[in-house]
């Protein structure tokens, strides 16, 4: 049951240039994996480091109820966090912001892609943003109206009464260019955020977080056994090219074609659809006939999905691109072919241009992509063929590239009337205070369910430049490399790194002192992402524990961590005004615990011939975006904190990625496709956002498989 998930890039970049002399020991440690194939190394290290995670995660899929499944997943995640291969870091939001966008008029759904759909955003016109007090009023209004379908109009009425008029244009920054426009051949959120504007799916979550029919004429009919979902497709919707020229109608076969191409291209998201009958067999080559896959057009406007087994979260996935439609006319015009082998051969031969540019895809969504200049701007204009065109609030979306060199760029643009909103980091906040904009207009933005962990590379193989791997910037000797890899394979050492970082100080460099804890997360899956629907009795350590219905996922994680004697806090029952939370506090930083763990690691590694003392520290290279003052300060904060907590037994070497943009930082730890091409010992450039409403959407990414997030720890 293998699956993948989308990957997010952070807003800016980091780097690589190191320096440390070679140390010679009488008995030099030896790489136990030298000469082995990387796949074999990956298998051995994965089971050695994440074997318990893998075991409990497998138990979750054998569970009899959804609640029991989630309980086992919580235990599995506890084991994942205890391994120390990742340090949960931050989510999006939680910073001071100023904005002209009314809250909750863009979907607040925590999974999928609907948070990047802006057609219903309510944007005020004029020079002044919405006040902080008005933001509070609108959030309260949303809580009152949620589920009624009345909030958007109520927000407009409130703002109109307050004297505002409305704009139909949204302008915002972006930080990473799309690498492809093919929605079915990417797992990167930087691609999807752009592509999502031009394609609409069957179902979408609205601003009240209610899933509504979009290209589906209504909600599907579901068979009694939960295996068959039948949709009626909305008639009268057309595909167009980027110029708005009509290509063909959107039909049930458009969805079949998209699913077929998804399985053929295997771009990193295809394993999300494991539950569709025949999908895995088709991708593996066990069957070669797509007719054996459970996605059928029963007629022009009737679409049916057949599952191999019931899936409780199946419909929550329909706002994600794995279930998008595709224009067959455009696909064929641009050299697209069907079949796993046929597609691979066409790509190899260079005969496929589908998805290469904004002109090489079809559009059926709210916007057409009308212009794109790399590292400059992307423009989206309303699509007259969009099924809900007449009800769109936003008719144009403009993206302006922010390379991160200027920490007040977005704020400056906002004050010039060129931006619809701006987050206020430390420098921008000071400007806002000087301009008299802070007290009345700054509010704290909500956090979401994205997670930007730091990853520790268990078996680093790549030490080359980010733009030219034939040139090696590192000064780590071969012995240094072996010593560091062996240290990173030691659990006590990894946990010492994770508990030795003052994440508040680290985060304050890009947030502010006042907001530095707001978007800190302490687990991979948010602790309140799901809660038990039924009572569950399960073993926690040596004790049988009964959890009542309503118990949060995070509570079970914390109980398992406590039972295992690991001194980290991932769930605080008193946080969030007593509702409980896994975010908004630093439950990992513990210098005393770090010192104790490091003492254990020194003793254990000495038995492997790895001597660690102040004269012979373990070197950890951290690539960072040196052009950005914010991210340079953040890297320095990480270096100072870990070195201090570990008593200088660890030497964090900050390595400049160089270049005029964030590209080389992304090349270090975001764009590489395999674990052996990840170019760091520790990194904070990559993150993840959920695809559907189940913890599986997070935990799948850490399965031992090519293409998932396990590559970020140097495996597969």
Image (tube, grey):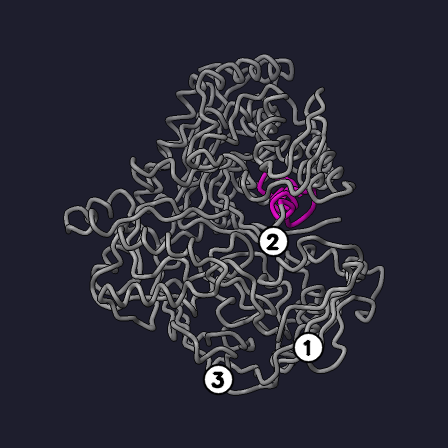
Q: In this view, does 533 lie above or below 238?
A: above
- The residue sitting at 35% across, 63% down in the picture is 155
Q: In the rendered image, is residue 301 in sight?
A: yes
Q: Is mark 3 on a helix, strand or loop?
A: loop
Label 1 to label 2: alpha-carbon separation: 23 Å
The image's mark for residue 692 is 2
Q: Does 609 appear in magenta?
A: no
Residue 636: quadrant of the picture = top left
Q: What element carries label 2?
A: loop
Q: In the rendered image, is residue 17 in sight?
A: no
Q: Provide the residue span drawn in magenta.
A: 695-716
Q: Which of marks 1 and 2 is nearer the N terminus?
A: 1
Q: Point out residue 173 in the picture as x, y percentages from the top left corner.
A: 35, 59
Q: Point out residue 695 in the picture as x, y percentages from the top left corner.
A: 62, 44
Q: Point out residue 209 in the picture as x, y percentages from the top left corner.
A: 51, 58
The image's mark for residue 244 is 3
Q: Which of 451 and 633 is in front in this view?
A: 451
Quadrant (top left/top right/bottom left/bottom right) for the C terminus = top right
Q: Earlier in the sequence, mark 3 or mark 2?
A: 3
Reading the image, the residue beneath label 1 is 252
Q: Residues within 10 Å of mark 3 (few under 14, many from 20)?
A: some
Q: How crowded is mark 2: few (under 14 residues within 10 Å), some or many (20 or more)?
A: many
Q: Do the residues labelled 3 and 2 touch (CB within 8 Å)?
A: no
* Left or right for 131, reference 570: left
């Amino acid at each position: 049951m293998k699956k993948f998930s989308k990957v997010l890039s952070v807003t800016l970049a980091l780097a690589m240039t190191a320096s440390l002399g070679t140390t010679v020991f009488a008995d030099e440690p030896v790489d136990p994996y030298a000469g082995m194939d990387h796949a074999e190394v990956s298998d051995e290290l994965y089971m050695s480091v994440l074997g318990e995670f893998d075991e409990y995660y497998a138990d979750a899929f054998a569970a009899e109820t959804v609640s029991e499944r989630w309980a086992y997943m919580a235990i599995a995640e506890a084991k994942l966090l205890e391994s120390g291969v990742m340090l949960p870091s931050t989510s999006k939001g939680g910073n001071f912001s100023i904005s002209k966008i009314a809250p909750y008029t863009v979907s607040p759904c925590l999974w999928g892609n609907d948070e990047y759909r802006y057609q219903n955003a309510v944007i005020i016109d004029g020079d002044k943003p919405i006040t902080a007090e008005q933001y509070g009023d609108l959030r309260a209004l949303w809580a009152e109206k949620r589920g009624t379908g009345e909030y958007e109009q109520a927000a407009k009425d409130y703002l109109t009464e307050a004297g505002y008029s409305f704009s139909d244009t949204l302008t915002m920054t972006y930080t990473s260019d799309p690498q492809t426009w093919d929605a079915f051949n990417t797992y990167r959120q930087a691609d999807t955020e752009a592509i999502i504007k031009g394609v609409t799916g069957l179902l979408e979550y609205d601003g009240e977080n209610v899933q509504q029919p979009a290209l589906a004429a209504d909600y599907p009919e579901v068979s009694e056994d939960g295996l068959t979902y039948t949709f009626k497709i909305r008639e009268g919707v057309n595909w167009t090219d980027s110029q708005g020229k009509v290509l063909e109608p959107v039909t049930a076969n458009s969805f079949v074609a998209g699913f077929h191409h998804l399985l053929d291209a295997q771009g990193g998201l295809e394993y999300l659809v494991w539950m569709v009958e025949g999908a895995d067999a088709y991708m593996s080559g066990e069957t070669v006939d797509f007719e054996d896959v459970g996605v059928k057009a029963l007629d022009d406007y009737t679409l049916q999905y057949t599952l191999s087994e019931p899936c409780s979260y199946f419909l929550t996935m329909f706002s994600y691109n794995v279930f998008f439609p595709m224009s067959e006319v455009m696909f064929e015009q641009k050299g697209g072919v069907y079949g796993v082998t046929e597609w691979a051969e066409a790509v190899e031969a260079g005969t496929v241009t589908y998805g290469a540019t904004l002109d090489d895809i079809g559009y059926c969504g709210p916007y057409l992509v009308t212009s794109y200049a790399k590292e400059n701007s992307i423009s989206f204009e309303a699509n007259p063929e969009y099924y809900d065109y007449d009800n769109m609030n936003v008719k144009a979306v403009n993206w302006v590239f922010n390379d991160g060199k200027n920490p007040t760029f977005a704020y400056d643009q906002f004050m010039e009337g060129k931006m619809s909103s701006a987050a206020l980091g430390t420098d921008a906040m000071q400007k806002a205070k000087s301009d008299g904009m802070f007290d009345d207009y700054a509010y704290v933005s909500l956090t979401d369910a994205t997670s930007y962990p730091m990853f520790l590379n268990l078996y680093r193989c790549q030490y080359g430049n980010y733009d030219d791997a034939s040139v090696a910037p590192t000064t780590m000797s071969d012995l240094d490399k072996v010593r560091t890899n062996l240290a990173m394979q030691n659990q006590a050492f990894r946990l010492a790194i994770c508990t030795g970082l003052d994440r508040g100080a680290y985060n304050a460099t890009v947030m502010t002192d006042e907001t530095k804890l707001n978007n800190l997360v302490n687990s991979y899956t948010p602790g309140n992402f799901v809660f038990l629907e039924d009572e569950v009795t399960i073993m926690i350590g040596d004790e049988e524990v009964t959890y009542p219905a309503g118990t949060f996922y995070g509570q079970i994680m914390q109980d398992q961590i406590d039972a295992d004697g690991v001194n980290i806090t991932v769930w605080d029952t008193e946080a969030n005004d007593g509702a409980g939370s896994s975010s908004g506090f630093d439950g990992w930083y513990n210098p005393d615990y770090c010192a104790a763990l490091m003492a254990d690691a020194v003793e254990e590694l000495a038995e492997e011939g790895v001597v660690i003392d102040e004269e012979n520290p373990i070197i950890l290279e951290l690539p960072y975006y040196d052009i950005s003052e914010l991210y340079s300060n953040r890297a320095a904060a990480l270096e100072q904190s870990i070195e201090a907590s570990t008593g200088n037994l660890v030497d964090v070497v900050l390595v400049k990625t160089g270049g005029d943009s964030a590209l080389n930082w992304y090349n270090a730890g975001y764009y590489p496709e395999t674990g052996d091409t990840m170019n760091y010992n520790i990194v904070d450039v990559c993150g993840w956002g959920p695809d559907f409403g189940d913890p599986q959407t997070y935990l799948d990414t850490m399965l031992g498989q090519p293409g998932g997030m396990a590559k970020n720890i140097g495996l597969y």
